Amino acid sequence: MKDMAARRSSTEKPGLPAKVAFLRQPASYPERPATVDVLETHMSWLFMTEQHVYKLKKPFHHDVIDYSTLAARRRCCRSELRLNRRLAPEVYLAVVPLTVDRAGCLALAGAGRSIDWLVKMRRLPADMTLEQRLRHGAFGARDARRIVQRLVPFFAAAPRAAWTPAAYRRHLTRSIRATARQLARPEFRLERPAIDAIAAGLLRAIELHAEQLDARVRGEHIVEGHGDLRPEHIYLTEPLSIVDCLEFDRELRLRDPIDELAFLTLECQRLGEPRSDRWFFDAYRKLSGDHPPRVLIDFHKARNAFVRAEIAIWHLDDPETGPPQHWIDQGNDYLRRARLAMRRLR
């Protein structure tokens, strides 16, 4: 009776607190786990049993990200499953409905009407992420090569962007200007001169290196990639798995492989491994046969740091994501790293 009562909602349409309360309970899952570990992120709740992870998207809406309706969350869950099976087919298992019956009882894939959707994944060992390897000084050139070996055929098989060279440069320009506008909001208290200088330098780099950027488009190097290639998303398991791509906006997945790798090396360097740039790009050149100009790698590294400053500062719009100063400090750290990468563009 207690289980049944706990699963009841006092409203006709249970809200997010009721859904989270239900999903916290071990009895809610078909595998009947002993415990459920719970993690809240900016846009989702993760519920982890011994074997599986169930991801519930919040009714979140910001800029290009729209999870505000049930239909949008269902669509994004299906996209997440499909897209992530490209680099982690054994991890992404299903999209599961959260249902409520006439008595107000919630269930996973029950007989009632669907009131939300969850992505069901196989749980991977947390200590096998690239992030944890970096934090413990246990990452080396062989690991970098293994990651690149997984990515090179993925990039080669990925759909090509239908952009002209001019359209690609316009896309980069719009992105830089939009990021600068966001970072310059006075309530964020970031260093305005640094923001203006980085934006101006990146825009100048697009003009100075237009021919090299255009060559990347003509060489069909702009592909539908992962879009968020962070160390925490790479599991050095067997087989290697890369999870959590950007599912909500295809344009954000349209990237040059060197753009994706520049972002990855930026994040590895933040976690204390300065040699990651050499390891990843040496492996990429050897395995892909692609020899991109160094200036474009540094451009993408600077631009990614600029964008990551914006993403860090977004958290200030949500008071539940922790102390504001943490995100301000993180935003300024990314701006500092953008400036460092910019020095090599001159």
Image (cartoon, rainbow, N blue to C red):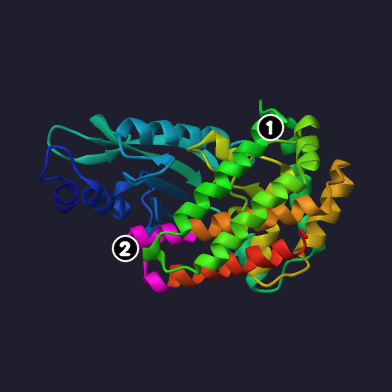
Q: Classify 193 as above or below 254.
A: below
Q: Amino acid at mark 2?
A: Glu
| Pick the front one: 186 or 42 | 186
Residue 286 among those drawn in magenta:
no
Quadrant in which residue 321 is drawn: bottom left
Residue 53, relative to residue 106: is it above or below?
A: below
- Work out whether residue 58 or residue 239 is closer to the camera in this orientation and state it: 58
| Amino acid on which disc 1 is placed | Ala
* Quadrant in which the C terminus appears: bottom right
Tell me whether circle 2 and circle 1 mark residues in contact (CB < 8 Å). no
Task: List x then y, in percent, for residue 224.
Answer: 64, 34
Q: Determine the secondary structure under disc 1.
A: helix
Q: CA distance from mark 2 to mark 1?
A: 41 Å
Residue at (54, 32) in percent of width and height = 82
User: Any mark on residue 320, and which?
Assistant: 2
Quarter holding residue 166: top right
Q: Is residue 324 left or right of residue 335?
A: left
Q: Residue at x 75, y 33 (%)?
A: 217
Q: Position of residue 272 (x, y in %)?
A: 67, 72
Element on which disc 2 rests: helix
- Which residue is at 61% across, 43% downward? 173
Q: Earlier in the sequence, mark 2 or mark 1?
A: 1
Disc 2 or disc 1, which is closer to the eye? Answer: 1
Q: Nearer the viewer, residue 317 or 92?
A: 317
- Residue 248 is left or right of residue 165, and the answer is left
Residues in magenta, as a range: 312-325
Instruction: Give the main secondary structure, helix, strand or loop, of the magenta stretch.
Output: helix
The local crowd at label 2, few if under 14, some if 14 to 19, many if 20 or more residues have their Cα within 10 Å, is few
The residue sitting at 41% across, 47% down in the picture is 55
- The residue that disc 1 covers is 166
Of the pair 177 and 116, the residue shown nearer to us? 177
Q: Residue 242: x, y in percent?
A: 63, 48
